[in-house]
Image (cartoon, rainbow, N blue to C red):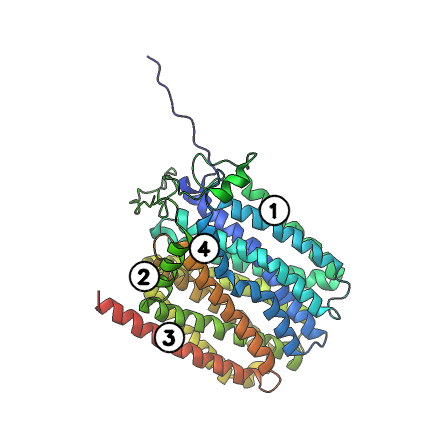
Amino acid sequence: MLTVLPPPSYPLTLSLSRPLRYAVFFYLYVMQGIPSGFYLTALANYFTAEGVRPNVVGSFIAIIGLPWGFQFIWGPLIDRFQGSAMGRRKPWVVGSQLMTVLTSGILLFVGNPVTQITTLAWLFCLRSVFAAIQDASVDAMAITVIPEDERGRVNAFMRAGFLVGTGIGAAVFATVLRQYGFHGAALLQIVFLLTGVVLMAFIREQPGDRLLPSPGNIFSFLSRTRIRPESSESFTTSNAPGDPPESPGPVRNDGPHDFRWLFTQLFRGLFARRSLLLFGTIILAYTSNALFLRAYNHHLINKLGWLDTDVSVLTGTYGMVVATVIALTGGYLADRIGARRLLVIMLGVVAVYLIGFNLLSGAWIQRDVARTGLVALYFMDPAVSAAAMPVLMGICRKGVEGSQFTTYMAFVNLGDIAGTYFAGNALLYLTAPTIGLAAGALAVVAAGVALLTVRHYRLAG
């Protein structure tokens, strides 16, 4: 008697392979980090070294970051239109990737970035619109396919990927800017971004998804919104060889939801008391980090005479290594001891660092001290992110996880933008150590509120 064997499953399917989830989300965030390192670090330090005023540099970064501050617009659209045969989120990811490549090409029309800094900022802003859509769609895909007990570690890999990309963008592009000019750096960015498009062409979210769109699939994607049964909001199957069995999460197949339902659930999730308190502490932490980072980089170049390439390369090498190690360790600890407990600890560490290092500002003239401080500064973002991302994922409401998490990320980005913008303007009147102490005070408030909130809700059950 012949035994009919089932057809082999496609190996590059996110829902079926744990190693693939780690690798793909890591790489997608590398591709997001490279442009960030390019303009936030390499270009910003380049402008500082060329004598551009700090408030102009701060405004340059703020303009580029504007689309990220309004990222919450895309979450409901991504949750609403998810009926493609290519998967629920993949069309959004691939489509936005292609648009970031195309809009990056417009940067080649800039002749002199120093004299055309405002034009350059708005061209980067246009690219950021599609980069923000990509980020939102990748986060929505992550929430859909990552099991709850993996979220801390996968989020750590995602943040580590972003930091590695930022390091590449800072170190590599700072060197390219000086040796081959702005056009060489812009072309290199396009090449990097194209690799992400090629990667996603071979990836499936769920078994049975198409790799490429079929004729008429785009119309179907825009007109059909029913969630397929095998693509539930909390799909947690992991059947890769060697993976431990995982308990499936609740399956949602409620049919199509209109925008009224989406926004009602979204506002309930966002304005819940616990959500407001926890997220408030997180956004304060990110704001304090951005506030001191821009002030300190400016101080190193303008006050201590560092070359902009020295700052950018140090950031993209040793700083990136420290940040990556902290991100991966933090992800493991978040799953091990609990993300909320880790968040309180990390916020306390950040507060101690900011206050302590700025009280010792007299020693910054020693190059080893200043270098150590810059490298150590890059532990703050991954330290907070490793705990904050699982916490935010955990308080998202079922059915609108993509929209709610994207909204959180939008306000995190606004915190980064605000910190950078205020630092640029404050540097006209205040010293970097004074700004750093103010950032430390924000971190102290964040740590205190987080501690009280976590303790209250633990005691309340």
Give the residue at x 46% y 81%: 355
Which residue was labeled with disc 3? Answer: 447
Q: Is residue 187 left or right of residue 376?
A: right
In the image shown, does 270 or 364 lie closer to the viewer? 270
Give the residue at x 40% y 71%: 280
Looking at the image, is mark 3 or mark 4 earlier in the sequence? Answer: 4
Disc 2 crowd rating (10 Å Cα; few below 14, some 14-19, many 20+) is: some
Looking at the image, is mark 2 or mark 1 earlier in the sequence? Answer: 1
Q: Which image quadrant: the C terminus?
A: bottom left
Query: Do tag 3 and tag 2 residues touch (Cβ < 8 Å)?
Result: no
- Cα distance between the residues tagged 3 and 2: 16 Å
Looking at the image, is mark 4 or mark 2 earlier in the sequence? Answer: 4
Residue 312 in percent (x, y) is at 63, 67
* Element at label 4: helix
Is residue 310 shown to the viewer in this render? no
Q: Is 264 rendered above or below residue 363?
A: above
Disc 3 crowd rating (10 Å Cα; few below 14, some 14-19, many 20+) is: many
In the image shown, does 14 or 265 lie closer to the viewer? 265
In the image shown, does 461 or 225 lie closer to the viewer? 225
- Cα distance between the residues tagged 3 and 1: 40 Å
Quarter of the image where one finds residue 362? bottom right
* Element at label 3: helix
Looking at the image, is mark 1 or mark 4 earlier in the sequence? Answer: 4
Looking at the image, is mark 3 or mark 2 earlier in the sequence? Answer: 2
Which residue was labeled with disc 1? Answer: 195
Residue 76 is tagged as 4
Which residue was labeled with disc 2? Answer: 338
Residue 75 in percent (x, y) is at 46, 56
